[in-house]
Amino acid sequence: MTRLRSCPDAETVAQRAAADVRRDLARARRERGVAHLALSGGTTPARTYELLAGEPRELAEVEVWFADERCVAPEDERSNYRLAAATLLERADIPPERVHRMEGELGPDEGARRYAQLLTERLPGADGSAPTPSRPSALPVFDLILLGIGPDGHVASLFPGAATLDAGEEAVCLGVRDSPKPPPERITLSLAVLRAARGCLLLATGPGKADAVSAMLTQRSHHIPASLLRRERLTVIVDDAAAPDGPRP
């Protein structure tokens, strides 16, 4: 079952999320010697990144990846990488060799192809093994993926009713050309990779997200991509305004 946690305000959501991220990364380092974390863009995760940057030692032996990216240059103000760099990566002085950005400037097809190749080369599968010539498509497994949710229920750049939701269980990274939100061209992790992660942490704040959160928890539908996440590995942290039942005392 999905773990749902409600907090009184957005700042408390960020604090709770940062604590959960630190805990999960520490567990991964203890068990496997390294932790693989995927970040998302958006205003909701940004404050969590700032809090994580305040304790850079907690990010030792962490490999940083991305759940999705806009097809723009890394210095573009719309870039998810730029947001993460300003709020977390530079503040915590994470070495560049441990940061693996999606190359949005290459376009959706080539950018997705290169990221999928990098993931399958660098990220072990569920059994801890790397891909081999006889099993080149072993699905990479993240220790934690940090996600936001759109008012339409989208996660990463997987949008309602999109063909990318039916990409199959071996798909790793996908190009998007018709995002309903600008810019239209993007790169995203596949639904299969999101579902394969050891944990997903989804954050939602503000009344504009309440309907999406409620829908994702009550039905599984391609019209609500967030509802297709693997529920037993999903934690949702919301503020009272975004809680399915509205504000709580």
Image: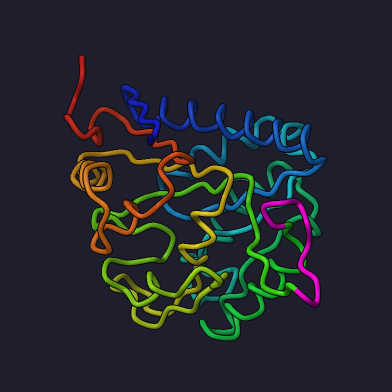
Predominant SS of the magenta segment: loop
Would residue 164 appear left or right of 173 to someone viewing this image?
left
| Residue 49 pos. (x, y %) | 56, 41
**In the rendered image, the vertical position of residue 140 relative to residue 74, given as above or below:** above
**In the rendered image, the vertical position of residue 65 relative to residue 172, given as above or below:** above
Q: Residue at x 21, y 34 (%)?
A: 244
Would residue 103 appear left or right of 201 to someone viewing this image?
right
Let me know if residue 136 is in the magenta part. no
| Residue 236 pos. (x, y %) | 39, 37
In the rendered image, the residue lying farthest to the top is 249
Which of the 4 image quarters holds residue 75? bottom right
Q: Residue at x 51, y 68 (%)?
A: 169
**In the rendered image, the vertical position of residue 128 relative to residue 173, given as above or below:** above
Which of the 4 image quarters holds residue 93? top right
Q: How is the image coloured?
A: rainbow
Query: Is 33 in front, or is 239?
Result: 33
| Residue 221 pos. (x, y %) | 25, 58
In the rendered image, the residue lying farthest to the front is 134
| Residue 112 pos. (x, y %) | 57, 77
Let me know if residue 126 is in the magenta part. yes
Magenta range is 125-134
Q: Residue at x 34, y 75 (%)?
A: 179
Would residue 6 appear left or right of 211 to someone viewing this image?
right
Would residue 26 appear left or right of 19 to someone viewing this image?
right
